[in-house]
Image (cartoon, rainbow, N blue to C red):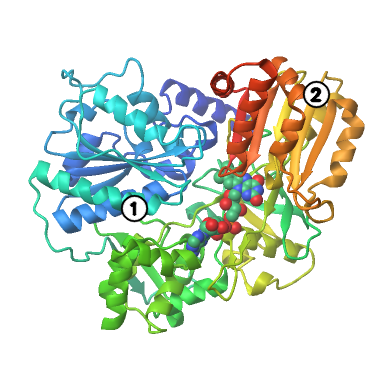
Amino acid sequence: AELDTLDIIVLAAILLGTLAYFTKGSLWGKTKDPYATSFAATNTAKAGKTRNIVQKMEESGKNCIIFYGSQTGTAEDYASRLAKEGKSRFGLETMVADLEDYDFDNLDAIPSDKIVMFVLATYGEGEPTDNAVEFYEFITGEDVSFSQGNDPPLDNLHYVAFGLGNNTYEHYNSMVRNVNKALEKLGAHRIGEAGEGDDGAGTMEEDFLAWKDPMWAALAAKMGLEEREAVYEPIFSVVEREDLTKDSPEVYLGEPNKMHLEGAAKGPFNAHNPYIAPIAESHELFSAKDRNCLHMEIDVSGSNLTYQTGDHVAVWPTNPGEEVDRFLNVFGLGSKRDTVVTVKPLEPTAKVPFPTPTTYDAIVRYHMEICAPVSRQFVATLAPFAPDNETKAEMTKLGGDKDYFHEKVNAHHLNIARLLESVSKGKTWNVPFSALIEGVTKLQPRYYSISSSSLVQPKKISITAVVETQILPGREDPFRGVATNYLLALKEKQNGDPNPTPFGLSYEITGPRNKYDGIHVPVHVRHSNFKLPSDPSKPVIMVGPGTGVAPFRGFVQERAKLAENGENVGKTILFFGCRRRNEDFLYEKEWEEYKKILGDKFELVVAFSREGPKKVYVQHLLKERAKEINELLEQKAFFYVCGDAANMAREVNAVLGQIISEQRGVPETKAEEIVKNMRAANQYQEDVW
Ligand code: FAD
């Protein structure tokens, strides 16, 4: 029989799969996480590039490499800043490198007059970031070995380390701590202290700034570097193209990559290649007038995207038009917004963080985190470009004085354009565009805990997102979150408003070249370890106040479906918390449906914080149920917490210790130990942010 097209595709896929298996994926670049199979989307561009860091440094004449392990872009940003500073202040030949792009078995071959920096974020429960998994497993592995066979193995290596963590998590900065330990054990020599930044205390930026100066001093002393007066040198050339207009077919107007520009993008869809997903349905979940919470159904049936209950979906937002305008105007680019530019790296190891040729408008709207907090270091960098001396003096003061900066900038949630506008009293700034590309972080996707079950709706992803609004003293308009207000506009459009402007903000809802029309949103899926027990008869205890209930809606949906399918489903208790029954009781009606199916197996316990004379939170209700909770834990119940990392998750952890201590008659220290062991055994899982 003749082969039809499908057969050929299947055969080709098997052949490719086999090839990938036998070459361990090395033809495409290594990938571990099945959700991060980025070879088709990005690594084709990297194919042929070396994974040999020593060779790379030699070829490009570098003597200082800065590796980053980054999930949300901050570590990557810090790495770039170190590279920039090393070059401008000390004349180091620096390069920034993604840990994922190199092999590490020849770290011992890096000559001792070179320097290696590690900027490492810790993610979730003490895990490496996705791009650092392989490096981490390698360097902390039992049988790590290197190419040269030196003794000690890394005696040649001189390194610098900084970690990004959050002290509200159990494994605070474990990534940098463990890597540092491993490197020391292998005989590598650290220069300066291994720094630690704390997002939990909100001091990340200041911790970084406080760490880097002594580090540079130690490094300069060690390597005999001479400090010179830092002059700004652009990393990118930005050339305005008179031969192209925004309607030229090769010009990117916000399309994330070449495939998207040239036609319907193909999978695999991942962190480098979003799927432009139709929103099947969206509605408001709150009854309160002044707060919004969105429920959205994202249809992934047109893609090969899959998810498992408990995974995260990433939404790629766009900036509101008003902030795009403000940014362009403050830099005098308002009238040039549609001018086409080509951006190229001026040195081979720098990467342009968006595809070009493109327009100023598209860069600012789709690729720059223009609404985010401003870094004090960036303010200092911009001082020389101030339009007058008074402004320059103020910028220098802001850049140099931590407390003054906090009072004037952070406390008001100023973004870069708002700050510059106010300091220069409306005068425009003439800053090389390269400095903005270097200094403003890449616009990051926002993650949401998927609130549906993949067993029930494998091709439709639900999200439950509270719209971010903060009323701040000293600022006339409230702060509005980027992604959630964009989603709110999409919801309003879907529900009949042809030109939604939530809170006066407008969005390019139909996307570049109207490709997102018909209500689409760019997304990808991120695998998580937050999972139901594989044996459904095991009891589960879930604690998820506010939007922390998102993944538990998926969990309960799944358990109800399993029960319908005739499976024996164990006790399923959900602790939910909100302000008032008639305001923000998420999915109130739905829980009743699940109750009908699961009967006594399902119980919803709700804490209303603003209904009675005293505030009641989930942890109070946990305590009231101490006896039952302990019994369930003794039956090996799985315990889950989702939502606010800063306060709630911590308190729940403490309360669980107290419950175990009281109920089992053991000292608190012993009970804490038991909770720790539950975490280690995955019997206690957190999905917190
Ligand atoms: P952003 O614009 O990113 O602002 C967020 C916060 O950053 C602000 O409130 C403020 O504190 C700070 N900030 C921003 N700009 C400034 C400034 N200029 N100055 C000072 N401070 C500033 N959320 C949900 O609603 N539901 C979920 O299910 C959910 N799941 C998540 C799962 C994971 C794994 C993670 C990491 C997060 C999850 N989140 C969830 C949070 C979500 O990803 C977003 O952070 C949230 O929706 C806010 O995004 P935004 O773009 O609207 O706000």
Quarter holding residue 662: top right
Q: For numbered disc 2, what is the local secondary structure?
A: loop
Most extreme residue toward the right is 596
What residue is shown at x 79% (from left), y 51% (from top)?
A: 613
Residue drawn at point x = 27 percent, y = 18 percent: 145
Q: CA distance from mark 1 to mark 2?
A: 52 Å
The location of residue 149, given as percent across then percent down, is 18, 18
In depth, the one of 128 and 514 nearer the eye is 128
Tell me: 164 left or right of 182: right
Q: Which image quarter holds the C terminus? A: top right
Q: Amino acid at mark 1?
A: Lys
Residue of label 1: 351
Relative to the observer, which residue lies in front, 155 or 679?
679
Q: Are marks 1 and 2 in contact (CB under 8 Å)?
A: no
What amino acid is labelled 2 in the image? Answer: Lys
Q: Residues within 10 Å of mark 1 (few under 14, many from 20)?
A: some
Q: Earlier in the sequence, mark 1 or mark 2?
A: 1
Please state if 299 lies on the left or on the right of 683 as rendered.
Answer: right
Residue 45's image quarter? top left
Residue 533, x across and y down, in percent: 68, 22
Q: Which residue is mark 2?
A: 571
Residue at 60% x, 69% y: name it: 478
| Relative to 626, residue 499 above or below | below
Q: Give the foreground label among 1 and 2.
A: 2
- Give the class, few, some or many, for how many residues have Cα within 10 Å of label 2's Cα (few <14, many ≥20): many
